[in-house]
Structure formats: C-alpha cells, structure tokens
Amino acid sequence: MTTTEGVEVVVSEFQPLPWTSDLSVSVRVIDDEHKVLLSVYNDLVGSIEHRDPKSVADKVVKELYGYTKYHFGHEEEMMSKLGYPELDEHRRQHAGFVNRIAEIQKHVDGGQANLASLAEFVQKWIVGHIMVTDKKLGAFLKDKLPDGDFEFDAPAMGVVP
Ligand SMILES: [Fe+2]
Ligand SMILES: [Fe+2]
C-alpha cells in the first residue's frame, strides 16, 4: 500500500497469487482443488477495476459458493472416512466461509459490490485457511494417501465452475 497526500491507494495490494509450493498441503488431490480456488481469486484481481463491478462480484461470488461447497465436501469426506480428529472444528470453519459468502451475495444482489473488499476477504480467508487449517489436515492425510489420490463418493455436492 502507498500513501499519496494522506489518501490510501489500495489497488497495488491486490496482486495475482501464483501457485507456489509454499501453499502445498502435501496431498495432490487437495492441492489441485486449491489451485482452482486461487484461479477464481486471480480472475477477481484481474477484474478489480472493471466498469461493471456488480457483474464481476456476482460471477465471483457464485463461483466461490459453488466451488467451495464442492471442495469443502471433498475435504470433509476425506476427514470423515479417514478418522481425522479435528473434523468438527475444520467443518465449522468451512461453514463460516459458506455463510459469509451467502451474506456477501445478498449485498451484491442489493447493489453493493465492492471488489476490493471482496478480494481482501477472499485472499485472507483462502490463504489463511490453506496455510494453517488445511496444512494441518494435509500433515494427517499424507501418510494415509501416499500417492496423493482419493476415491470420492460421486458426485460431491456443489458445482465445478
Ligand atoms: Fe479446509
Ligand atoms: Fe481446502
């Protein structure tokens, strides 16, 4: 962030986030889905100055809602089938994100579409959750899934963008 005569210029805060090994949770099937989430965020950053913020916010929020339900469903299926002891807390975090996204959708429907604050929320939540909560899960799963693969019950809930 830079300051010009007391006015904060925030646009430079939002840079695309390339996938790096720092974000890996050491389980391929989860990493692959996180890459999709990052690409939704990166598309949002690329559209942050779009002249029709409502249409961008509408598209991004719908994609996030659908894809996170799909992805969270997969993580929760793995946790449940493989006996992860912190399933309840992890699931609570997922539900909190989905509820927040549903609230944001209401604001967008009501004509309030602030792409910078949406980007800030998505970046903080996704990166924060991957770096802490999903990494903890990955550490538990990686010995159980040495090839990084898992057969999900099909179909998972939600939609793929
Ligand atoms: Fe998660
Ligand atoms: Fe995740």
Image (spheres, helix red, strand yellow):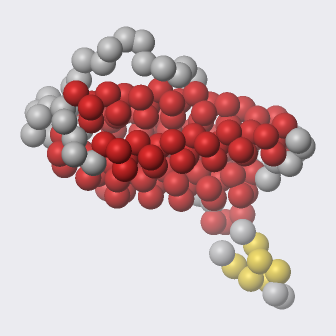
- Rendering quarter of residue 56: top right
Which corner quadrant holds the N terminus? bottom right
- At x 44%, y 58%, the residue is 128
x, y percent for residue 130: 39, 51
Q: Is residue 94 above or below residue 156?
A: below
75 vs 24, nearest the viewer: 75
x, y percent for residue 159: 54, 20
Q: Is residue 81 left or right of residue 17?
A: left
x, y percent for residue 137: 26, 46
Q: Is residue 139 left or right of residue 123?
A: left
Please, which residue is most extreme toward the top here? 154
112 vs 99, nearest the viewer: 99
- At x 51%, y 42%, the residue is 95
- At x 27%, y 35%, the residue is 79
39 vs 75, nearest the viewer: 75
Which corner quadrant holds the C terminus? top right
- At x 74%, y 39%, the residue is 105
Instruction: Kindly tell me whether residue 120 is visible in this rendering.
Output: yes
x, y percent for residue 51: 88, 44
